[in-house]
Image (cartoon, rainbow, N blue to C red):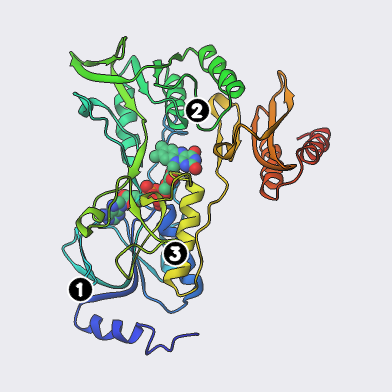
Amino acid sequence: MKKSWFSSGLFLRMILMKKSISYYDYIIIGASKAGLTAATVLREIQKDAAILIINGEDRLPYKRTHLTKFLARGFDTDDFALEKRAWFQEQCIDLLDSPAQSIDSKEKSLRCADDKKYFWGTLLLATGAVPKELSIPGHQWLSHLRTARDTESIRAKLLQCKDVLVLGQGVEGVELAEQCSRLGLTVTLIGRDDRLMKRWLDESQSARLLALLEQKGVRCIFGQSPCEIGKEGEGYTMKCDNQQFHGDMILSSTGICGNPVLAEDLGIYAQTGVPTDLYCQTEIPGIYAAGDVVQTPPGWPTGLWHWAEYLGTVAAMNMGGQKQMMENRPTRLKSEPFGSFYYSMSYQEVQSSDKSDVFMDNDRGYVRIFSREGRSISALMTGLGKGISKILDAGVKIGKAPGKIFATIEEAMKDGE
Ligand SMILES: Cc1cc2nc3c(=O)[nH]c(=O)nc-3n(C[C@H](O)[C@H](O)[C@H](O)COP(=O)(O)OP(=O)(O)OC[C@H]3O[C@@H](n4cnc5c(N)ncnc54)[C@H](O)[C@@H]3O)c2cc1C
């Protein structure tokens, strides 16, 4: 039911504005994929609502996934901006460049770095993730890359280095190693697993990736966890289980957890983030959470751009009164180290009893589909183009039979894909 202007909060807002108190129907803390998506959806479903989005960074909201892809090349401040500043004005969404510092859930207000108080009708925490700290001596010497500002300062330091250690062999670690290598550095990529990007790739793809990295001069060390970091002159030493490594800098990418700041003060932070119900509502009525800050149910996606977008949508629908329940959804990853293309969809869903069909495994590329009772549930691909990944995406999403997906791929390849 559409609210009248009197009941919509606009009336209250006008009175408060007269008294110099800022009231918004919706305040969103965190201006990245989850927060911005939520603001966009709220504007679509409530044309006259007052919406404030609080930006904690030093630039317009941007595509965070580009940071590890453009570290070597470098970028200008707003190169990856998701929207221009004018867009916020057009949408009547206020963007405040002043981080939130404290929240009073009883009064339904928050205070920002500008020392002003803002009142809300409904609040969304979209404050993202932070790197997991390793609890080892010397962990403060590790460099983490989470924001554009981090990327700029790490790049400036890397330009003064000769050799670098990269810790963590997941997607981010591999991309960081690739970028450091592009900068002409000697790179050692170290991790505790027995192969690269284990969460996303099968053995065959990991082996292809390893061959590629080694061919480009990146040294990969497996089965090693750091136990101590030390400073040695201008560089650092990293002691692992049974080996020791030296580098001018150590980049660490060993996982993330939901941002505890603000949530801990509210008493709604659990082990790895803010738990919500399936409607993105936290245990405090009127406070929702979306994106990487959320502690998702075990086995559900986490730390992914498209998942942050999905949760931002679900949260906004519920905040705006249109009930929508969160569902587990397929995970998807695309990574392009050294110009090659690695694609993985729902690989975490695969069980040992699932059927596997390898449709291509040669110099040109690799395609494998997993299926259960004749329906495709997961796909892996290397070496072929993005058009082929779209065919796999579409096929797995509707559970098409593996043979039918491959027939479509063959047709597309004949047409030059
Ligand atoms: C280097 C890198 C590469 C990645 N590559 C990929 C990839 O290839 N594919 C993929 O799917 N995912 C990738 N990810 C993950 C993806 O970027 C995240 O899942 C996504 O950005 C999460 O969005 P979010 O809105 O929940 O949080 P975030 O993007 O983390 O944003 C949270 C925002 O909240 C702000 N904030 C925090 N506290 C406050 C406060 N008190 N006041 C105001 N603002 C605050 C932060 O400053 C930040 O801007 C990558 C992440 C990184 C760091």
In the rendered structure, which disc, 2 or 3, sits on the residue that comes first in sequence? 2
Secondary structure of the residue carrying numbered label 3: loop
Find residue 302 and report its image quarter. top left
In the rendered structure, which disc, 3 or 1, sits on the residue that comes first in sequence? 1
Residues under labels 2 and 1: Cα distance? 46 Å
Q: Which residue is mark 1?
A: 107
Residue type of the residue flagged with mark 3:
Tyr
Residues under labels 2 and 3: Cα distance? 32 Å
In the rendered structure, which disc, 2 or 1, sits on the residue that comes first in sequence? 1
Residue type of the residue flagged with mark 2:
Met
Q: Position of residue 249 (x, y in %)?
A: 29, 21
Q: CB under 8 Å between callouts 2 and 1?
A: no
Relative to residue 43, is residue 295 depicted above or below?
Answer: above
Q: Which mark is residue 279?
A: 3
The 10 Å Cα crowd at callout 2, few under 14, some 14 to 19, many 20 or more, is: many
Taking the spot 46% from the left edge, 57% from the top edge, the residue there is: 311
Relative to residue 129, is residue 101 depicted above or below?
Answer: below
The 10 Å Cα crowd at callout 3, few under 14, some 14 to 19, many 20 or more, is: many
Q: Which mark is residue 197?
A: 2
Residues under labels 3 and 1: Cα distance? 23 Å
Taking the spot 44% from the left edge, 46% from the top edge, the residue there is: 298
Q: From the viewer's perspective, is the residue at label 2 or at label 3 nearer?
A: 3
Taking the spot 44% from the left edge, 32% from the top edge, the residue there is: 172
Left or right: 375 in relation to 187: right
The 10 Å Cα crowd at callout 1, few under 14, some 14 to 19, many 20 or more, is: few
